[in-house]
């Protein structure tokens, strides 16, 4: 930061430096033994809940023995009378859904965010700028009272209960429970040290049990306007990123003018779709709100960056405009050094929008960016692009080395960033080590796959980053400086965004039909299922896979296999196919190092399953390292010594696998999924080359091999044997399973049918 301006900012602002430390379980948490005892007592009885009658605003409207049509509207007070509802969401793990709308179980608090100017680190204060109060008003074993959510739609009402049967023990001390700071509060710093932080254990859950599904009709005339408002937040806002990136010297205007320099290829960056998945904003492919200017009054979240020289208030409202690329918007703000202007940043659609061209009817082609699907072309390469020899702050320079690799000297991150697989993020690599943020570079190479969010509102737990981005408490998890928004959203905007997210599954049937056709076509399976080889995609899209009896039979067989081999975890009452269990890292494993968020919880949650054909394109599992559904469930992947296991998890000369012809690999050959991961070495004859190599070598699990002097290889077996002391501060390695996600089909002959069924989810 410029010294004169820094002095001016420090004189004018009390928030020049961080006012304290971020909370950690070690300094802010204690184990609530009384609460845990109540949970254990509740867990003694696990019975299926049953709704016997429903009162609406005090009036009896529905009875199980005489069911009638149930009509509701937002804010109606609902009282469920029945059996085995449990003790509520803070004792048990409970939730209620009405259609695609989940009833909010807890108060959401929006804390005021500030920026420590010297460190350029964002933090929150104990002061609230907004809140969204829980819909739950009362919860007993035989009686639950709640309000119908604002974003409720016609569908089924259902209550689900899981007992918290015990807790995960700390991997650092097996005699102690593992505690985490509440997701809403972990960025709060209280200079007066008076704030009382909420903490909890990571619970082990029992089997999900749910009530009967009760059809309800919702009269919600305000819902279309609420959805439209949320659509604007998804497509037309920039989440304060543009100004933040500008302050750190990233020039998005130059990038989209195709005047930026790519230091890895040593060329001008012109193919933005291939480089980082930027799709042009074309009318008809995106909603109108993504094309036209949009005035936000107010902006969905306050911007914590100070205004011009701290004398100009930061803009709280303003216009955003189309940059020419979907998911990237120019937004008005006040630059602390340059004054008022507009800067381009990205939003939900950049990562959670996939441009697909398909045959919607025989001979009729349609192209659309489907919101919610992960963009498999998105990459972090944008962060290394330069303009006028200026680079994004954090990519080059001096920063402290990790204790396990005390290599002094400058580092260059661009080569490693450039080869992070597409469709994933690495949430802390662009920060400097030692800056003081929650997302400082930690020298743990930990890519995380962009999640699918077409149908995620049934997911309650938000302890594991990137698994509940938007809607409800998930907004707090995605409020980090490097990769997401800065600050919690205003309640009205969060409600609107939640409403929009609740309708993103409207294309799921279409996507499943396209995916099934393309999978069968790519694997040459038409004749296997009696499908004419001449059939067009448009016919399949119009009439579905159910028209082919052999394929229907195969899907039914696959469903039975799924129930036998997968449903112990991927099972719930809301068709999200997850029991939300948090498995300790020592049981579930990871191919790359665990993320900072997975290390906080020391666990990874069971994924929810949706649109799996399309998720293959960004890679499967939490780090995206598995290339196809067939590889994921193939028992050979879970069998050390097999050819498939060796291809994924043992070092060998790189032989990239053949990619499915319907989706040519967008990834450089150096990091093709389904093969060993490697990154090029740089010539040591230049200072830049030495700095690039030094940065990679500071990471503990990149290694050099005898057969290839041109690359560093990711050594999974080395990480598997050593993970723990560096990452979790354990005394000894925690011991990872031989295979990440060590659960596959029981028999090889089950793979075909199981994949067929998975394509229908």
Image: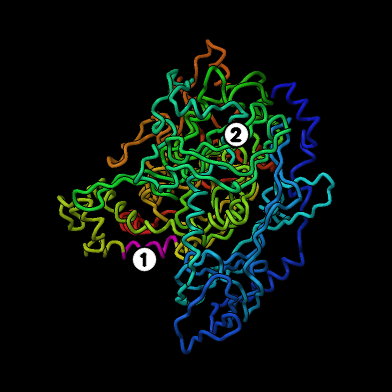
Identify the residue position indicated by label 1 in the image. Answer: 560
Quadrant housing residue 199: bottom right
Residue 731 in sight in this render: no
Q: Position of residue 51 (x, y in %)?
A: 54, 81
Residue positioned most to the top: 685
Residues in magenta? Answer: 556-566
> Quadrant where the N terminus lies?
top right
**Element type where label 1 sits in the image:** helix
Q: Element at badge 2?
A: helix
The question of residue 557 being in magenta is answered with yes
Residue 344 badge: none
Distance CA(mark 1)–CA(mark 2): 52 Å
Q: Nearer the viewer, residue 412 or 125?
A: 125
Q: Residue furthest bottom?
A: 65
> Taking 701 as reference, is 297 above or below it?
below
Crowd tier of the residue under label 2, counting other residues whose Cα lies within 10 Å: few below 14, some 14–19, many 20 or above: many
Q: Which residue has dot 2 on it?
A: 243
The image position of residue 527, as x and y in percent, is: 17, 53
**724 on left or right of 160:** right
Classified by dominant secondary structure, the portion drawn in magenta counts as helix
In the image shown, does 385 or 704 lie closer to the viewer? 385
The quadrant of the rendering that contains the C terminus is bottom left
Residue nearest the viewer, comparing 636 with 93: 93
Q: Closer to the camera, 278 or 563? A: 278
| Sequence-first disc among 1 and 2 | 2
Residue 438 percent coordinates (x, y): 67, 40
139, above or below 554, in the image? below
Residue 97 included in the magenta stretch of the image? no
Image height of 71 relative to 273, above or below: below
Q: Residue at x 34, y 59 (%)?
A: 509
């Amino acid at each position: 930061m410029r010294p004169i301006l820094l002095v001016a900012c420090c004189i004018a602002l009390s928030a020049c430096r961080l006012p304290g430390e971020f909370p950690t379980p070690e300094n802010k948490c204690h184990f609530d033994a009384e609460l845990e005892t109540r949970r254990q007592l509740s867990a003694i009885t696990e019975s299926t809940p049953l709704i016997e009658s429903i009162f609406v605003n005090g009036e009896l409207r529905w009875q199980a023995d005489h069911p009638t049509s149930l009509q509701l509207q937002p804010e109606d007070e609902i009282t469920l009378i029945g059996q085995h509802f449990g003790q509520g969401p803070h004792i048990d793990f409970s939730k209620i859904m009405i259609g695609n709308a989940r009833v909010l179980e807890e108060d959401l608090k929006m804390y005021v965010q500030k920026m420590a100017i010297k460190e350029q680190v964002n933090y929150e204060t104990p002061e609230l700028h907004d809140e969204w109060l829980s819909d739950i008003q009362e919860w007993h074993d035989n009686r639950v009272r709640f309000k119908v959510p604002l974003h409720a739609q016609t569908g089924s009402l259902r209550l689900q209960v899981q007992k918290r049967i015990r807790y995960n023990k700390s991997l650092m001390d097996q005699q102690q429970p593992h505690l985490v700071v509440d997701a809403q509060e972990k960025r709060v710093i209280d200079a007066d040290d008076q704030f009382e932080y909420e903490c909890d254990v990571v619970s082990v859950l029992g089997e999900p049990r749910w009530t009967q599904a009760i059809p309800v009709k919702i009269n919600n005339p305000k819902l279309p306007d609420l959805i439209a408002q949320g659509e604007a937040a998804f497509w037309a806002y920039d989440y304060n990123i543009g100004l933040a990136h500008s302050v750190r010297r990233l020039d998005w205007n130059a990038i989209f003018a195709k005047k930026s320099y790519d230091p890895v290829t040593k060329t001008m960056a012109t193919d933005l779709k291939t480089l980082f998945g930027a799709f042009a904003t074309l009318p008809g492919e995106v909603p109108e709100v993504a094309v036209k200017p949009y005035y936000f009054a107010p902006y969905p979240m306050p911007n914590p960056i100070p205004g011009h020289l701290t004398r100009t208030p930061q803009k709280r409202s303003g216009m955003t405009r189309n940059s020419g690329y979907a998911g990237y918007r120019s937004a008005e703000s006040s630059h602390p050094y340059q004054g008022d202007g507009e800067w381009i940043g990205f939003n939900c659609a950049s990562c959670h929008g996939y441009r697909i061209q398909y045959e919607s009817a025989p001979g009729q082609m349609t192209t659309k960016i489907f919101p919610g699907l992960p963009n498999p072309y998105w990459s972090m390469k944008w962060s290394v692009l330069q303009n006028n020899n200026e680079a994004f702050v954090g990519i080059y320079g001096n920063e402290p080395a990790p204790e396990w690799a005390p290599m002094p000297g400058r580092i260059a991150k661009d080569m490693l960033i450039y080869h992070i697989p597409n469709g994933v993020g690495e949430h802390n690599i662009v920060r400097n080590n030692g800056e003081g943020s929650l997302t400082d570079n930690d020298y743990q190479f930990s890519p995380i796959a962009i999640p699918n969010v077409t149908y995620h509102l049934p997911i309650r737990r938000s302890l594991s980053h990137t698994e509940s981005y938007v809607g409800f408490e998930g907004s707090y998890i995605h409020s980090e400086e490097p990769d997401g928004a800065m600050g919690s959203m205003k309640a009205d905007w969060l409600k609107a965004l939640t409403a929009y997210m609740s309708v993103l599954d409207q294309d799921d049937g279409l996507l499943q039909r396209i995916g099934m056709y393309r999978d069968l076509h790519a694997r040459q399976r038409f004749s296997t299922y009696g499908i004419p080889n001449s059939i067009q995609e448009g016919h399949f899209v119009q009439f579905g896979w159910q028209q082919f009896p052999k394929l229907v039979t195969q899907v039914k067989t696959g469903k039975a296999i799924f129930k036998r081999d997968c449903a112990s975890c991927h099972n719930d009452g809301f068709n999200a196919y997850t029991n939300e269990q948090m498995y300790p890292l020592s049981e579930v494993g990871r191919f790359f190092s665990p993320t900072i968020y997975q290390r906080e919880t020391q666990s990874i949650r069971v994924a929810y399953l949706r649109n799996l054909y399309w998720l293959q394109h960004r890679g499967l599992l939490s780090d995206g390292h598995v290339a196809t559904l067939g590889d994921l469930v193939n028992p050979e992947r879970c069998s050390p010594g097999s050819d498939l296991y060796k291809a994924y998890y043992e070092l060998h000369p790189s032989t990239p696998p053949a990619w499915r012809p319907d989706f040519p690999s967008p990834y450089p050959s150096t990091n093709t999924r389904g093969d060993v991961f490697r990154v090029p070495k740089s010539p040591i004859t230049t200072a830049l080359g030495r700095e690039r190599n030094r940065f990679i070598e500071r990471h503990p699990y990149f290694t050099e091999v005898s057969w290839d002097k041109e690359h560093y290889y990711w050594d999974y077996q080395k990480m598997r044997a050593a993970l723990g002391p560096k990452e979790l501060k354990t005394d000894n390695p925690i011991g990872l399973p031989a295979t990440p996600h060590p659960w596959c089909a029981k028999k090889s002959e089950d793979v075909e049918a199981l994949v067929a069924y998975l394509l229908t989810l």
